[in-house]
Amino acid sequence: MKCSRCQHENPGDAVFCEECGSRLEGACPGCGTANRLDVKFCKKCGQSVAARPPAATAVKFPPPASYTPKHLAEKILTSKSALEGERKLVTVLFADLKGSMELLADRDPEEARKILDPVLERMMEAVHRYEGTVNQVMGDGIMALFGAPLAHEDHAVRACYAALRMQESVKQYADEVRRSHGAVVKIRVGMNSGEVVVRSIGSDLRMDYTAVGQTTHLAARMEQMAMPGSVLLTADALRLAEGFVEVKPLGPVNVKGLSEPVEVFDLEAVGAFRTRFDRSRARGLSAFVGRDREMAALDAALERARSGSGQVVGVAAEAGTGKSRMCAEFVESCRARGVPILEGRGVAHGKTIPMLPMLEMWRAFYEIGDGDGPETTRAKIADRLLLMDESFREVLPFVFDLFGVPDPANPSSAIDPEQRQKRIHGVLKRILHDPAYGGLRVILLEDLHWFDGASDAYLETTVDSVPATRDLLLVTFRPEYQAPWMQRPYYQQLSRQPLDPARSCAISSGRIRASRRCPRSSTRAPRAIRSSSRRWCSRSWRAVSWQEGGAPTSWRRRSRRCRCRPAFKPSCRRASIGCRSSRSSCSRPPR
């Protein structure tokens, strides 16, 4: 018998799925006797169990194509030929409504659907917001994949953010249900990261895949073990999202079907990290070398802005060539000189979140902290704006809406979205031209290639305003990003190139010497490092040092010729240096 949740084939006498643990029986609507899901009549009373009242069996979310957003569906269908047959590292997420049978048992089928459907809609909205795909919709829950069929290097982070969002949105909906129906609505979520092989993707977006190891099984078990209102994840998922989320360790837990206990963690909140550079900074940065020309150009642009001619400087380069590191060094030098800084950055999942990078920048401008509630946020915004100009009072409701803290006592008026956007842009433009502040300021906006449409529109407004200010607007993006404002005469673009071999050696040698594990004579970097970028230099060093612990003993034992560079000549083609495998990661260390 095939499980309706994970599509695993089970023996005929199974009561629960061997892969995901789901029940394979359904209750008779007449007498309540448990029957196989593939039978048509109850074995005890003879009543039909295949035919249900139309309202109860109406399937609101049949094939994935019917509930997948159009922009995601186009991406999937465009790339499906390249995905089929691929081994992918993904994060599997299961979510369901706890106690749905008890919740819906005594209710009219139509009333039951009115309670259940909004829960499923909120689950799917959270998944699609972070570009995951809902592979299956069960009666009271969903199964979603992050990392396939749409490839994302931060799939585990996206899954965690989606889980937190669906818990928050369902919690708000549960308050409405409790008041209107007297029912308690709580969901539980579980996730795990591992490998799957994508077998095929149908025209209706239904994906057929094979899990490698216990990938799907563990995710389903995490969901079943989770308390209502909580999110559980495995150590494999946490390892990929560490620092981006806050968790509480629950210790080793015995899982049915596995011989060894599994480390389980309770997902609590979003972590301190926002980008990969934040993680690199926490681990410790390598020496900053080889960017004297670019730093001199930035200092010259800063002096032109100081003299009253606002400047826009763009740093264009491929991923991993050190755009963020160079901007961080420049920003820190500006802070040391007392120059105010405003920062905002795009994130990989941010294209579906309007104004996300701009809101980050303006939250810093208004000194709004992560722990500030709606009332505190509104007070900080109002105090700053009204201090500038009392006429801002009439647009405060629109600014509150932009920050997601609407004022119940003074809601904004209903106007055309385009007019609303123009009004907000006008407010922000006036803030940049505040006569009370005529000093030098640096505005850093990173990763423009991940900006949403609204942020792009506001960025153009900001660029147009820069010449009349003393601002230096510093932006970073990948070479494929293009915008009309790049033709402005006050715009300057810096193109980054990979480090030359000598400077690459300097970075690698510095990390090796700092470890105190190799002699000072070991200054020659591996070929993959000498010909690559700053990120690869750091990754190559982590391959050598195995983070803080140094190369494992078994590696050192294999390296007979050179005891100081055990991983410099990897024979494994799947090693992190020069990896050419289609696999997203390799658990086998370089030899």
Image (cartoon, rainbow, N blue to C red):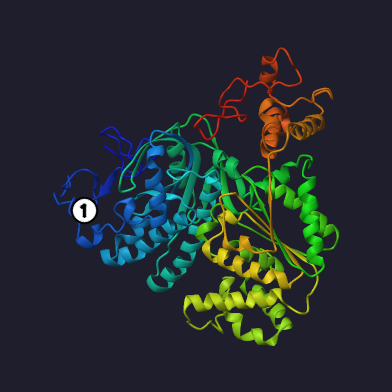
Q: Is residue 159 left or right of residue 98?
A: right
| Residue 400, picture quadrant | bottom right
Please say whether residue 479 is visible from this viewpoint. yes
- Amino acid carrying label 1: it is Cys
Task: Give the residue at x 38% y 42%.
Answer: 80
Q: Which residue is mark 1?
A: 31
Q: Quadrant of the C terminus?
A: top right
| Residue 513, picture quadrant | top right
Please say whether residue 546 is visible from this viewpoint. no
Task: Please state the horizontal and vertical placement of residue 298, each as a whole percent of the image.
Answer: 77, 55
Foreground pick, 170 / 300: 300
Label 1 crowd (10 A; few <14 / some 14-19 / many >=20) = few
Task: Give the residue at x 73% y 21%.
Answer: 565
Task: Please state the horizontal and vertical placement of residue 323, each as a whole percent of the image.
Answer: 68, 48
Task: Please state the horizontal and vertical placement of residue 210, each as a whole percent of the image.
Answer: 38, 34
Which element carries disc 1, helix, strand or loop? Answer: loop
Q: Is residue 430 above or below residue 292?
A: below
Q: Quadrant of the N terminus?
A: top left
Task: Give the residue at x 24% y 57%.
Answer: 57
Foreground pick, 455 / 400: 455
Q: Is residue 394 above or below residue 458?
A: below
